[in-house]
Each structure stands twice: as C-alpha cells, then as structure tokens.
Amino acid sequence: MVIHHGGAGTTQSTLLSGKPSIIVAHVSDQFFWGQELERLGVAGKTLKRKSLKAANLAKEIRNVSSTPEMALAASEIGKRMAMEDGITTAISSFEKLVLGK
C-alpha cells in the first residue's frame, strides 16, 4: 500500500502502481481524490492531516492490509492504466476540438 497526501499527480502514480492507498489529506482536491479512491474500492478511509492520530492511521493500515479485494481492485486499475496511451488520446482530442479533425 501507499500512504500519501492525495494530490492529483501522486494519486495518478499510486493508481498506476496498482497498490491500494491510504490518503492523509491536507487541503482542497486531496479530499476529493480520497473520496474517489474510496468509491473505486482502492483506498481506506481518507484521513485529515490536522486531526491525524497514530491509532487512526494504524487502524486504516490494518483495514487496507486485511482487505484483499482492495489490493485486487488496485491491481486491475493499474493494469488498465498501463495499457492507456494518454498522449495519443490527448492529441487526438485536441485535434478534434481545435482543428476539427
């Protein structure tokens, strides 16, 4: 598992790794990404940095470690993401929008 702050880039990297997450959110979009990973079934409960206690983090580590479905879901998402060609897709979308191709 990966314990991280839940920023967009870190979240993308973690998903690509195929490992489940525990997010310790600090501000703004990090809470959104935490909720999204929870919805996808690849993360434990999003924790707030300001109220973080060792016991709460330990509880989530145990929860994620003992939930094989979470590891499987994370692995599947990582595999699907690794097969994507994001640059080609982005260029194609841009050309359609701007150039009318």
Image (spheres, rainbow, N blue to C red):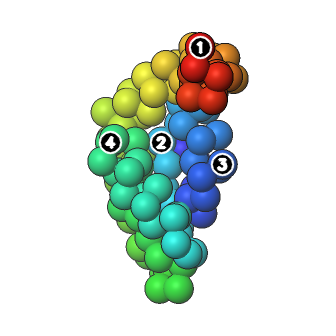
Q: How crowded is mark 3: few (under 14 residues within 10 Å), some or many (20 or more)?
A: few
The secondary structure type at the circle numbered 4 is: loop
Residue picked out by circle 1: 101
Left or right, residue 7 beside residue 57: right
Q: How far apart are marks 1 and 3 (CA)?
A: 30 Å
Of the two numbered discs 1 and 3 in the rendering, the one whose residue sits closer to the viewer: 1
Of the two numbered discs 4 and 3 in the rendering, the one whose residue sits closer to the viewer: 3
Q: Which of marks 1 and 3 is nearer the N terminus?
A: 3
Q: Earlier in the sequence, mark 4 or mark 2?
A: 2
Q: Is residue 16 above or below residue 76?
A: below
Is residue 62 visible to the viewer in this orientation of the structure? no
Identity of the amino acid at label 4?
Gly
The quadrant of the rendering that contains the N terminus is top right
Q: Which of marks 4 and 1 is nearer the N terminus?
A: 4
Residue picked out by circle 3: 9
Residue picked out by circle 4: 41
Q: How far apart are marks 4 and 2 (CA)?
A: 9 Å
Q: In this view of the protein, which residue sits in the foreground, 43 or 65?
A: 43
Of the two numbered discs 4 and 1 in the rendering, the one whose residue sits closer to the viewer: 1
Q: Where is residue 2 in the image (x, y as percent from the top left)?
A: 58, 48
Residue picked out by circle 2: 20
Identity of the amino acid at label 2?
Pro
Of the two numbered discs 1 and 2 in the rendering, the one whose residue sits closer to the viewer: 1
